[in-house]
Image (cartoon, rainbow, N blue to C red):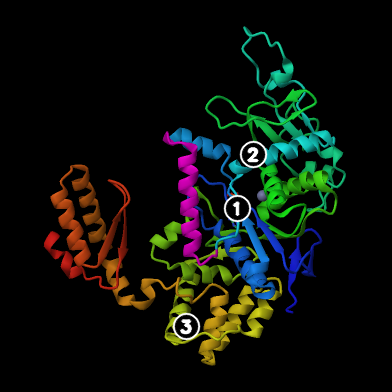
Amino acid sequence: MTTIKLYNTKTRKKEVFTPLKADDVRMYVCGPTVYDRAHIGNARPVIVFDVLYRLLQQVYGKDYVTYARNFTDVDDKINARAAETGRTIREITDETIGWYLDDMGALGNLEPDHAPRATEYIPEMVAMIELLISKGFAYFEDSPRLHNQPPAKYVVLDESKLPRHALFEVRTYEQYGRLSGRTLDEMIAGARVEVANNKRDPMDFVLWKPSGEGEPGWDGPKSQGIEAGRGRPGWHIECSAMSHKLFGKKFDIHGGGLDLAFPHHENEIAQSCACYGEDSFAQVWMHNEMLQVEGKKMSKSLGNFFSVRDLIDQGYPGEVIRFVYLGTHYRKPMDWTNKKAKEAEATLRKWRALTEGVEPTRAIDAEVLRAISDDLNTSGAISVLHQLARQEDKELLLASAQFLGLLTDEMLDPAWKVPEELETYVEHRGTVEALIAKRKEARLAKDFATSDKIRDVLLAAGVELKDISLTEVEFKITRDFNPAKLESLK
Ligand code: AMP
Ligand code: ZN
């Protein structure tokens, strides 16, 4: 069997990967908070762990690997988005999850076997918090009135019923800091911790917090006659509770972006090991480095902040985007540049032309497998693909590229087959978009004769429309795009 080596953040070493059970390999990856389109940084862990998922499937067999990636659908940023837009939380999270799956699919990622939503696991989180309290690792804040002051005119008859926070007490968990290999005091010195008077230690973190009116809330944990009351879970407890429900006490790999290593993953470990024992939870911890744009941190104020959908809308086929990501090892910072995208496009065009009509071999190239098995050396694997292309080893090139999620039929963008048509479209994009806008106005004015006419002309010119609502429309440029046929409407 192929030997897989993975870098384990916890031991800071590249180790031979030995699953707990070779016929039940389990991987959990922290997924997105769903209130907006995924930005191109968010796509990095998805692609990295998709490659790992494919590798595990290749080595252990498709039926013996389970991949879970959660959706954080309870979060203050989601509440804020709902308040800003006047829409319900569920509308926002459902829509964002749909976008996320579409956008990640467009980049050639397989869907995980489980995609748990936090809000569907609240009872499991509550049970875990209650267990932590009963074991002495967590506590209810002492004086809830300090933070949830009831108006003075009310007399509180039963203090045990006041809504209150539950917190994890880091000093009770001796191993806190195992992942980063730092002591609690070193962490306090390096972190910007919020000092709050309901905490016994500034590093204690929230397991449960009270919800105000209009905020989402559920019945909270209860213990020894005290009830936390209506509230919502903190972020960290969600991954501990969901991975436990899906995978049990122990599983193989836990992944996410490097920004999650502290405090999120440190806190997940503390909660899960405090509940279920020292050797429980994930055996191997993996983290991808961050993505930058043209050498700079991505930020809205620098104007270099893109969503995956922005790139696709700019005309980058998903396969080109994926290829750029695979060019950098996951433990190195990655730079998105237009130059890299242009080069990726040229390479993929060549490989597509070379392998057209070819049947892939059943096995993939041994060198490609070796590179990926060596801590996901994707850039090494791409060098091997270049070599196969130079040797015109078409069948092996196709099979090995498909293993990495490239050159697959699903990734065949119309732009690959008909480059001239797409270029023509880019030239005439303004006209098409103006006609779509004109049709929207006609629909709003209930002038369906005009709107139908525009639709027919666009279709005759090779632009297919799909109405989503009265004002929203999706469109697709077909291979028969012919701008001359738009003339009659100009
Ligand atoms: P979030 O929705 O912010 O919790 O992020 C979802 C995932 O994207 C997490 O695994 C993050 O670590 C990862 N992530 C966020 N920003 C970047 C970035 N610039 N580069 C790479 N990964 C990122
Ligand atoms: Zn997580």
According to the image, label 3 marks what residue?
A: 351
SS assignment at label 2: helix
Q: Relative to 1, say whether 173 is above or below.
A: above
Per the image, label 1 sits on a secondary structure element best described as loop
Instruction: Please say if the residues under marks 1 and 2 sit with CB atoms less than 8 Å apart.
Output: no
Q: Nearer the viewer, residue 411 or 420?
A: 411
Quarter of image, res 44? bottom right
Q: Is mark 1 within 8 Å of ligand 1?
A: yes
Name of the residue lying farthest toward the right: 174
Circle 2 residue: 122
Residue in view at x 51 percent, y 88 percent: 394
Q: Which amino acid type corresponds to the residue marked 3 in the rendered image?
A: Trp
Where does label 1 land, which residue? 31
Label 2 neighbourhood size at 10 Å, few (<14), some (14-19), many (20+)?
many
* Secondary structure state at the residue bearing disc 3: helix
* Vertical relation: 237 (above or below) 430: above
Q: For the magenta stretch, what is the residue range?
A: 85-110
Label 3 C-beta lies within 8 Å of the nearest ligand 1 atom = no
Amino acid carrying label 2: it is Ile
Q: Counting residues from the N terminus, which is met first, the one under dot 3 or under dot 1? A: 1
Question: Quadrant of the image for the N terminus?
Answer: bottom right
- For disc 1, the neighbor class at 10 Å (few under 14, some 14 to 19, many from 20) is many
Disc 3 to disc 1, C-alpha distance: 32 Å
